[in-house]
C-alpha cells in the first residue's frame, strides 16, 4: 500500500486555493467534529478525507515519529475489519485510498464513486475509535518505518542536509525535528506509545471531515451524523501549546559533507510569517516575494540573473509555504555550475538579493506574478481532490473557511510596497542559517620518493 509522508526536504507549495468548484458548506457535529462540503457535480465521484489536528510537531519529547508511525498502524484491523481489509474494500469498490503526515496534521482519504460515500464514512469512523493493534504489528510496522527512513532520508544527502538545516534553524520549536523522526527514537516506539497517542488525538473533536465531489450538503450531514455522530469526543483535547521559538539573534552556518553529492549547493533558511486567522496580508506579501524571486525558471529574479544572464547557476530558487500552524521557513537555494565554488555561489546569492532590495520590483513582473497566481487558483477548481486537500491543510493549521475564500482577494490587493517591506525585513534583518551541501574535500596524498 502506498502512503505519502511529507519530509523536511523543502518543497515549494502554491498558496491554498481560494476558489471551489461549487458551493462550500460547513457545519459542526454535536461531538465537535467539523465538516466541510465542496460540491462538484461534474463527475459522479467523491473524495472523502478525515484530517486530524495533530502532527509531528505535537509529539512528546523522545517520541519523534509517533504521528507517522500511527498513520501506518491505522491500516491495521479494528473490531469490525481485519488487518489490511480497509484498503481491500476501497479497492473492491473501485476506489483508491492513502494517508499523509505533516508537522501540523495527519490525514486519510479515499476517492470513490459518490454512492460509496456512506461505506467510506462507516469504515473511517470505525477506525477513528476502534483500532486494534498488536505487539507483532507494532514490531513489523516499526521495521517498515525504519526502512522508510533509510530509503528516503538516510540514503539521500539532500534529505539529510535539509533535516540538519531545520534542526539548526529552529532552536526550540518542534519544527526542528523531521516528520519521520530520529532513528534512535523510532527504534523504541512501543504499542503503549501508539495507543496513548491514538486515544488522545484520534477523536471527532480533533478532526475535520472534508467531502468534495458529487454530493449534496444535506446528504453529507445525514451520513456524517449517522456514522461519526455517535463517536465520543476526547476529553484531553485542548488548544495546541507548543514550545515557543526564542528570538534569533545571530546567523549560523553548517557544512554537510557526503561523498554521494552530485551537485553541491548552498541553501539559506530564515524564519518567515505564515497565514494567520483573519490576518493573511503579511503571508500574501511573502508569497508574492517567493514567486518574484524564485517562481519561474526564466523570469524570476534569481534564475533570470544567475542561470540565464550570467550562466553561473544550474538552479536558483525560493521555497515558501505559508500554510502552517506556527511560523515556518523561507528558503533560498543556489546550485552553481561546475567550477563555481560554494563560497562564490553564496556571494552570488547575496549580490543578487542586495541588488533586488536596492532596485525593487519591476511593475510588469509584479502584475504578471499576480495574474499567474490568480490563474493557478482558477485552474485548481478542476482538481476536486486538490481543493479538499487545500481546505484540510488550512483548517488544521488554524485557518477558517472564510480565510481560505478570502485568500485570492488578499493576494490581488497586495502592493509592491507591501512586498518590498516584507522583503527588507526577511532578507536584510532576519538572522539566517546558511548551509553548504558538498562532497568531502580530497585529502592531499604525500608522494614518497
Image: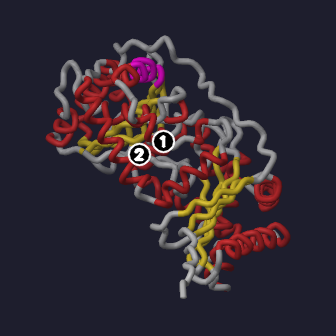
Give the colouring mode of the picture: secondary structure
* Residue found at x 70% / y 52%: 270
Q: Is residue 22 above or below residue 158?
A: above
Q: Which residues are magenta?
A: 196-206
Quadrant in the rendering for residue 211: top left
Establish if 182 lies above or below 202: below
Q: How many marks?
A: 2
Where residue 315 sits: x, y (%)? 57, 73
Whether residue 371 is visible here, answered yes or no, is no
**Which residue in the rendered view is the most extreme toward the front?**
449
Residue 199 among magenta residues: yes
- Residue at disc 1, secondary structure: loop
The foreground one among 433 and 37 is 433
Q: Is residue 258 left or right of residue 176?
A: left
- Which residue was labeled with disc 1? 179
At horizontal 69% and vertical 68% (from top left) the residue drawn is 367
* Mark 1 in CB contact with mark 2 (< 8 angstroms): yes
Q: Which residue is mark 2?
A: 5
Q: Main secondary structure of the magenta part?
A: helix
Sequence order check, earlier mark of 1 and 2: 2
Whole-percent x, y for residue 182 in the image = 47, 40
Q: Mark 2: which secondary structure?
A: loop
Q: In which image quadrant can residue 194 be found? A: top left
Task: Reply yes or no: does residue 12 show up in magenta.
Answer: no
Q: What percent of the width, then of the height, locates residue 207?
A: 45, 26
Q: Going by the image, does 121 lie left or right of 281?
A: left
Residue sitting at the far bottom: 449
Amino acid at each position: 500500500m502506498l502512503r505519502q509522508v511529507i519530509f523536511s526536504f523543502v518543497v515549494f507549495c502554491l498558496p491554498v486555493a481560494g476558489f471551489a468548484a461549487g458551493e462550500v458548506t460547513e457545519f459542526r457535529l454535536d461531538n465537535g467534529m467539523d465538516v466541510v462540503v465542496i460540491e462538484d457535480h461534474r463527475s459522479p465521484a467523491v473524495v472523502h478525507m478525515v484530517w486530524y489536528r495533530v502532527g509531528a510537531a505535537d509529539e512528546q519529547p523522545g517520541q519523534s515519529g509517533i504521528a507517522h508511525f500511527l498513520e501506518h498502524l491505522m491500516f491495521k484491523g479494528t473490531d469490525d475489519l481485519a488487518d489490511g481489509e480497509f484498503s481491500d474494500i476501497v479497492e473492491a469498490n473501485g476506489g483508491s485510498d492513502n494517508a499523509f503526515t505533516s508537522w501540523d496534521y495527519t490525514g486519510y482519504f479515499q476517492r470513490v464513486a459518490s454512492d460509496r460515500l456512506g461505506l467510506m464514512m462507516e469504515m473511517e469512523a470505525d477506525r477513528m475509535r476502534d483500532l486494534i493493534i498488536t505487539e507483532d504489528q507494532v514490531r513489523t510496522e516499526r521495521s517498515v518505518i525504519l526502512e522508510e527512513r533509510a530509503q528516503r532520508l538516510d540514503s539521500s544527502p539532500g534529505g539529510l542536509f535539509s533535516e540538519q538545516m531545520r534542526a539548526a534553524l529552529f532552536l526550540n520549536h518542534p519544527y526542528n525535528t523531521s516528520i519521520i523522526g530520529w532513528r534512535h527514537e523510532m527504534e523504541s516506539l512501543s504499542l503503549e506509545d501508539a495507543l496513548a497517542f491514538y486515544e488522545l488525538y484520534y477523536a471527532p473533536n480533533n478532526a475535520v471531515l472534508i467531502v468534495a465531489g458529487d454530493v449534496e450538503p444535506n446528504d453529507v450531514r445525514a451520513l456524517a451524523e449517522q456514522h461519526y455522530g455517535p463517536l465520543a469526543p476526547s476529553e484531553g483535547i485542548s488548544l495546541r501549546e507548543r514550545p515557543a521559538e526564542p528570538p534569533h539573534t545571530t546567523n549560523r552556518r553548517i557544512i554537510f559533507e557526503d561523498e554521494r553529492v552530485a551537485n553541491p549547493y548552498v541553501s539559506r533558511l530564515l524564519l518567515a510569517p505564515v497565514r494567520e486567522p483573519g490576518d493573511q496580508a503579511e503571508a500574501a506579501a511573502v508569497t508574492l516575494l517567493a514567486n518574484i524571486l524564485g517562481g519561474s525558471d526564466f523570469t524570476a529574479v534569481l534564475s533570470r540573473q544567475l542561470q540565464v544572464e550570467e550562466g553561473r547557476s544550474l538552479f536558483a530558487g525560493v521555497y515558501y509555504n505559508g500554510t502552517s500552524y506556527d511560523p515556518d521557513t523561507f528558503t533560498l537555494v543556489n546550485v552553481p555550475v561546475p567550477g563555481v565554488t560554494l563560497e562564490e555561489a553564496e556571494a552570488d546569492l547575496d549580490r543578487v538579493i542586495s541588488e533586488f532590495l536596492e532596485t525593487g520590483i519591476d511593475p510588469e513582473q509584479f502584475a504578471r506574478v499576480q495574474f499567474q497566481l490568480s490563474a493557478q487558483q482558477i485552474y485548481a477548481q478542476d482538481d476536486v481532490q486538490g481543493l479538499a486537500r487545500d481546505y484540510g491543510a488550512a483548517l488544521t493549521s488554524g485557518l477558517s473557511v472564510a480565510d481560505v475564500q478570502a485568500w485570492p482577494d488578499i493576494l490581488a490587493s497586495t502592493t509592491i510596497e507591501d512586498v518590498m517591506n516584507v522583503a527588507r525585513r526577511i532578507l536584510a534583518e532576519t538572522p539566517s542559517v546558511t548551509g553548504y551541501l558538498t562532497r568531502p574535500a580530497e585529502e592531499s596524498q604525500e608522494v614518497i620518493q
